[in-house]
Amino acid sequence: MTDKPVLPMTKRDLLTLIGKTAGASAMYMAMSSLGAAHASPFKGPIKLDGDVKGASVLILGAGVAGMVAALELRRAGYKVQVLEYNDRVGGRSWTLKGGDSFTELGGATQTCQFSPGNYINPGPWRIPHHHHGLMHYCHELGVALEPFMQLNYSAYCHNTKAFGGKPQRYATIQADYYGHVSELLAKAVNQQALGDALTKEDGEILLQSLKNWGALDKDYRYVKGPASSDRRGWDKRPTGGLDAAPIPSEPLSIETVLRSGLWRNVSGSLNFDHHNAIFQPVGGMEQIAKGFERKVGDLVRLNSKVTGIRQDAKGVTVAYTDTKTGAKMTAKADYCLCTIPLSVLSPIEMNVGPELAAAIHAVPYRPGLKVGLEFKRRFWEQDEQIYGGITTTDLPISQISYPSSNYGSPGPGVLLAAYSSGAYAYEYTTLSPEERVARTLEWGSQIHPQYNEEYMNGISVGWHRVPWTLGCFGIWTEESREQHYKNLCQIDGRILLAGEHASYVGGWQEGGITSSLDAIGRLHQKIVAA
Amino acid sequence: MNKHSIFLVLSAMIAAVTVGSQSLAQRGDADSASANAPPTARSGDADGAFVSASKFSEPDGEKLYKRVCAGCHMPDAKGATGAGTYPALARNRKLAAAGYPAYVVLHGLNGMPPVGQMMTDQQVADVINYVRTHFGNTYKDAVTAADVKSTR
């Protein structure tokens, strides 16, 4: 053993993780007993009853927030028109597949070379079961869902500074981390080190639970044997036949687990938004956009760049430019629902009150970058038995997500080979698309050396270079929420806003949908009551 | 368990980890050895990029501009326009008062995140000084790290 820890873990680090675990489960138990964890602001299909008095609504943006409003407002009897900048509907609900092309700010155009059936979702890519609003519309629109493999125990935890950079299976790290923590806590109970925190009887129950949770032996030790190997994996797995007897594996020491830093990688799926069941649309997230398009595509005018929004006593006038012809146009309606991302909206001229104007200017947009790589064969399945799920790493790629469909097909297959955020995402974004792919190959091959032999092609989306969002999604802080959130959501005369930026579910489609339903519900009440 | 007892259990776990690790060190030594082998840490790129996910490590203004700011404002600092717009920093009169770009880099503006939060005071000063003396900007009064610190 070296004296100097490779990755020293402070008490604070450990507290953070344990606190996160205990805090989340304690909170969940408390919430469940009140029925709150399964509740949702979405109360089923919105009912917009009453006389809409022939009113018209102009919707800006044909992402999920705009499209759900178009669907429900037309259903309620409103005259609806939608203006969309892109040449397609869906906004960030978007899929890149073979033949699709994408031009980023700066002018670089990439055309996706993926084989038929392969794709990446540059934006949202998964749908938690409790995102009831989005689930409702998937069902109504006939969007087929399939399970998204969020947590795969055979995927890797990887840290360039641990195990000589060799990736470790998730199952191994989680089992050894839980096992050692259980053993230590059992020791503390047995040595009466917890003082009066627990009664003797509750201490006994805790010991039993630790044996169960940590796969401890009869003496409350986490040691080599069938119990630990059933969690972390065997040196030789049990099979059938003459020499079938299994050989248990040796657990890592607690120091190894702690110093590796890989305990950080086992907390990712604890978040409520990542719990099973979690889904993806069959064929890519664009299936949601296509579903809405089937219902209300006739209301959408594509290739329309909004340049000004003006309201007066009679209605709202929106100036826009046809991006194909350059023609300057206007659209008028009684009311306007604006779902344009705030990063795009903030410089657009718009006569709203000072509170709403300040809110529109108060939300910065998060960096984010994804890279999809296509390979000749699905080596992660064929060589490493990884069927879906996510490998996490401290490399700038941050994660590798394996496809959650077409298991066992020979290939070609596509990996989401980078999903980067923070400082790395800014730095990645400054590279050319070719350089991004080259770096992604270089980094990913440290985890999967097969990259070098099997690579076919790749495509990248750096969200700050996306011309119609200028970033991934809105960043709120406690302070900005306090100061601006309600002002952002209030109806300002004849104008109101919706989108993920007007929600507490930032970056998720559920935020856009519930925000939009709430907005049109309030607008409808105002119109009916007028 | 109430909050108080949860805290006690967690405190005990921390203490147990600290004490218990000594007696556990013998087990799994082969693997421990490999975990603590000389690290293969990437030191990132030569220009300081890709060193850390939580901070920028580019050592001077030019490198910071190229590897951070250029993502939006573009390598020629002329900005870009799609549905929305990134303003040009080239020949930008708003850079005349050095306090303004310092404030924007530290606190963000509209959709722009406060990227200076992931830079040192010196890095913020360096990148502002670089932009204010390049791309057609000729503002000679340099910003210091101390100026940045007072704006942070």
Image (cartoon, coloured by chain):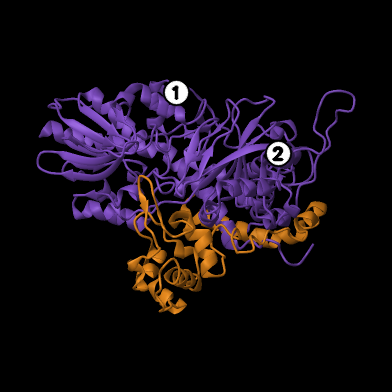
Chain A painted colour: purple
Is any atom of residue A197 visible in this view? no
Identify which residue is drawn at 46% across, 77% down: B145
Asked if badge 2 and badge 1 are on a common chain, one would say yes
What amino acid is labelled 1 in the image? Answer: Val
Give the x, y percent position of residue B9: 57, 55
* Label 1 crowd (10 A; few <14 / some 14-19 / many >=20): many
Q: Quadrant of residue A323?
A: top left
Residue annotated with mark 2: A231
Front residue of A73/A222: it is A73
For mark 2, name the chain. A
Give the x, y percent position of residue B95: 36, 69
For mark 1, name the chain. A
Identify which residue is drawn at 58% across, 45% down: A418
Front residue of A5/B86: it is B86
Residue annotated with mark 1: A143
Give the x, y percent position of residue B46: 64, 63
Q: Quadrant of residue A36?
A: top left
Chain B painted colour: orange
Is any atom of residue A145 visible in this view? yes
Give the x, y percent position of residue A395: 63, 52
What amino acid is labelled 2 in the image? Answer: Arg
In the structure shown, which secondary structural element does the residue marked by tag 1 occupy? loop
In this picture, residue B91 sits left or right of residue A76: right
In the structure shown, which secondary structural element does the residue marked by tag 2 occupy? helix
Lower sequence index among marks 2 and 1 = 1
